[in-house]
């Protein structure tokens, strides 16, 4: 795996100029989501944001279509199993990316946190689980609204960055901690962490990336080349 500093950026890909207009469309869609998040921080908004973002993510996600479907299935099964195991005393959500599952939220006891992790590890095709559940009282609406706003601000700044592709990252925020997931190069990973750290309200950044080489990224952009599967997770790294 090649290590690369942000100052040693690769030469622009020949297709970059052709991608400017589509990128602008994704930026517009993402900024629309930011506006919605800032003005509609309510339960029904989550479903609305998912509907707005679905088409863009399918078109720009670096996972295969099969992997996206698998992640959706894993996430649904994980949420259902946690709900069955812990009942109404927990506020936990599962986020799956490339068969790696992030758990965030709140449970009343350490035993409940461990139980949630074990339940999710039993879901078929799960490769890794990062259990970041907090032990304590369930977050109130204000806390949830603040986390949602942080997520949308980080997303908007990633979209605005011209040296990385913002839609390559999956962003989750819980209790002001930002979690970044994605299939990215080391250069992209370092840049995204820097952007997230500099975002107002963020207390910590944790990464759960699949690191690929710059050449693998170029191959992904060329539909006529067969892409090798991304490497195994680099690890769960507080950044």
Image (cartoon, rainbow, N blue to C red):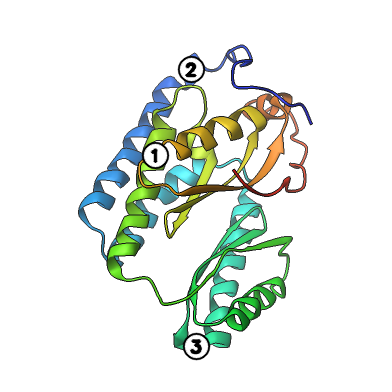
Residues at marks 3 and 1 touching, judged by CB atoms closer than 8 Å: no
Disc number at residue 155?
Answer: none
Judged by depth in the image, the label closer to the viewer, 2 or 1, is: 1
- Mark closer to the chain start, 3 or 2: 2
Residue pushed farthest left? 39
Figure quadrant of the N terminus: top right
Figure quadrant of the C terminus: top right
- Mark closer to the chain start, 3 or 1: 3
Residue at image mark 3:
87
Disc number at residue 199?
Answer: 1
Q: Residue at x 51, y 31 (%)?
A: 165
Secondary structure at badge 3 equals helix
Is 27 positioned to the left or the right of 59 in the image?
left
The quarter holding residue 122 reads bottom right
Give the alpha-carbon distance from disc 2 to disc 1, as whole Å. Answer: 30 Å
Mark 3: give few (<14), some (14-19) or many (20+) Cα within 10 Å. Answer: few
Is 18 positioned to the left or the right of 114 in the image?
left
Q: Up-down: is 35 above or below 11?
A: below
> Can residue 10 be seen by looking at this rendering?
yes
Is 55 positioned to the left or the right of 239 in the image?
left
Secondary structure at badge 1 equals loop
Residue at image mark 2:
18
Judged by depth in the image, the label closer to the viewer, 3 or 1, is: 1
Where residue 175 appears, x then y in whole percent? 43, 60
Q: Up-down: is 1 above or below 110?
A: above
Judged by depth in the image, the label closer to the viewer, 3 or 2, is: 3
The quarter holding residue 41 reads bottom left
- Mark closer to the chain start, 2 or 1: 2
Q: Residue at x 58, y 86 (%)?
A: 85
Q: Residue at x 48, y 45 (%)?
A: 57
């Amino acid at each position: 795996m090649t290590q690369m500093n942000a100052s040693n950026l690769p030469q622009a890909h020949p297709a970059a100029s052709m991608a400017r207009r589509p990128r602008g469309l994704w930026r517009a869609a993402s900024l629309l989501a930011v506006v919605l998040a800032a003005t509609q921080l309510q339960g029904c908004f989550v479903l609305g944001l998912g509907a707005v973002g679905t088409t863009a993510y399918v078109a720009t996600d670096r996972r295969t279509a099969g992997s996206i479907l698998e992640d959706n299935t894993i996430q649904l099964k994980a949420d259902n199993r946690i709900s069955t195991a812990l009942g109404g005393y927990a506020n936990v959500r599962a986020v799956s990316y490339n068969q790696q599952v992030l758990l965030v939220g709140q449970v009343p006891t350490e035993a409940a946190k461990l139980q949630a992790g074990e339940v999710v590890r039993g879901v078929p095709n799960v490769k890794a689980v990062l259990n970041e559940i907090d032990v304590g009282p369930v977050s109130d609406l204000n806390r949830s609204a603040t986390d949602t706003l942080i997520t949308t601000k980080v997303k908007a700044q990633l979209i605005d960055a011209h040296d990385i592709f913002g839609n390559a990252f999956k962003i989750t925020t819980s209790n002001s901690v930002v979690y970044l997931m994605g299939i990215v190069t080391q250069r992209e990973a370092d840049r995204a962490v820097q952007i997230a750290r500099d975002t107002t309200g963020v207390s910590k950044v944790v990464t759960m990336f699949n690191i690929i080489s710059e050449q693998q990224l170029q191959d992904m952009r060329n539909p006529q080349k067969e892409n090798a599967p991304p490497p195994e997770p680099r690890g769960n790294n507080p950044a």
